[in-house]
Image: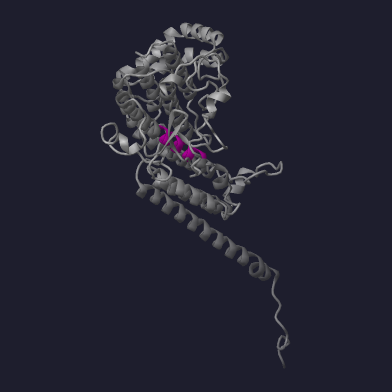
Amino acid sequence: MTDPTVGKKKSWSPKRKLLLFGVLPLALVLAILLMLDRAAHRRLNAVFREARLIGGPVSFGELLAARKSWPDEENGAIIFLELEDRLSELFRTREQFVALPGFDGRPILAVNDALPLGRRLPAGQDREAGQVLTRLTADLSQIDRLLGFQGGCFPLTIPTGPGGFYPQHLSHVHLSAKLKAAQAQYRVMHGDLSQAVKDVRVILMHGQLLADEPTLVSAATRIVCEELAVDTVQRICALATLTPEQLKELQDRLADTQCPDRLAWGIRGERAGFIQIADWHRLRNEIHWIHGDPGGLDPPPRWVGRIPGIRGLNVWDEAAGLHLYNRQVAAAGDRKRALQAHREVVAEMDKISKLHSLTLSIMPPLKQFFEQDGNLEAQIRAAVAGLAAERYRLDHGRFPDRLEDLVPQYLPQVLLDPFNDEPLRLRHCDGALMIYSVGADLIDDGGGLRGWMQKGPYPDWGFILLPPERRGLPATQPAAETQTGT
């Protein structure tokens, strides 16, 4: 008798079909996703090792611990903490300062160019400025106490959550520096040159207090305070003639202010902020939401971040962003290398997948900060050379024809343009002397400095010395004529 099953095709049971076509493929996909998650964590660990090999603090806690500690009796920031309520009040009512020289009353990080170089205030504005400064006498005297300190720093706390932090004292520091600059110019306009060096030193101290704060906005405020000090020196020299001793001290003070990269701490702080935001999302199992406009969509529920694959995608995102930050931190300390590294990072970000939404959303546009830092360095070097040229004029009765004429008696060496490493430019124009840098665009505009013969949106950066007969004139000539240089 034959077997009835012989010659018949075996059929699969439903359980076997489910196992073969359902469970096994899902298990295979899950295994692949888990492998990708593990690879992402290995990559993140490698990038963290890279950060450690670069050296220096990485997290916010390490950054704050690495700051120099100042006892209260040596900490100049204590003055601002004591004046916090008063400075807050002055900041709220800053419209009252519009009459002050070089002060526009707006809370922006910029130097005002409304007052023509070498001109005194109009009579009515001068009276109002004098009244304002009289009311501020006690406050400015407190700020002058900064000269009794070698440095200092403001207390900062480690931020919690994903938001980072904004140091609230920055607006007070900026306001205080602008008030001191206004007082310095007003004094010189009224013939008091005895406090000129002291006033500039006080302004420079404002920036020094922010030197190791791990935020880019702190670095930008420091840059503006030091730029304000250089602008004040230029305006003082355009109003009156200082003694050789005063010029030499100012020259030395500004020379000491030169810095290879004021942004190093700020970039490290940005990296620490990126790490903190990424960790915050990862520990809460939240996914990084869509880069750009999500079209009004709500973020997905938190459990989505636990799904294998999506979890690894978040980790890959953090690793990619941290690696880009590491490259910029490694180049910090050298302005040109740092700018080149940022350009490479920007080019690489154009190729990054939009799935790396955290990296694309948080990476800051550093180009403007590097240019601002380079502009300041150019102004400082031009001012140092300019003060040396003024000392030369006092000895020889005329401005030098070349920067080489200042070496070695007035300058140890010819100062270089920070943008192209060539000697700073020198130009005579209508009796004035201009010492300048070509600026970030690397185009020599013939000394078209900001507010003075500027020819386009990207000015040269430098220092102007007016001839003695054009210094401290009444405010009767229109600003347009004063600034043409023809």
Toward the left, the furthest residue is 409
370 within the magenta span:
yes
Q: Residue at x 33, y 21 (%)?
A: 75
Of 147 and 485, the residue lying toward us: 485
The answer to whether 65 appears left or right of 135 in the picture is left
Q: Position of residue 68 (x, y in %)?
A: 32, 30
Quadrant that contains the N terminus: bottom right
Residue 69 shows in the view: no
Q: Is residue 43 above or below residue 415?
A: below
Which residues are the magenta region? 368-379
Q: Position of residue 385 (x, y in %)?
A: 36, 32
Residue 343 shows in the view: yes
Image colouring: one colour
Which quadrant of the structure image shows residue 302? top right
Of 254 and 260, the residue lying toward us: 254
The answer to whether 77 appears left or right of 5 in the picture is left
The answer to whether 267 appears left or right of 112 in the picture is left
Toward the bottom, the furthest residue is 1
Q: Is residue 418 above or below residue 90?
A: below
Of 297 and 194, the residue lying toward us: 194
Q: Residue at x 52, y 7 (%)?
A: 127
Magenta span dominant secondary structure: helix
Q: Position of residue 82 (x, y in %)?
A: 41, 14
Q: Position of residue 485 (x, y in %)?
A: 51, 29
117 within the magenta span:
no
Q: Residue at x 32, y 38 (%)?
A: 404
Count of picture labels = 0
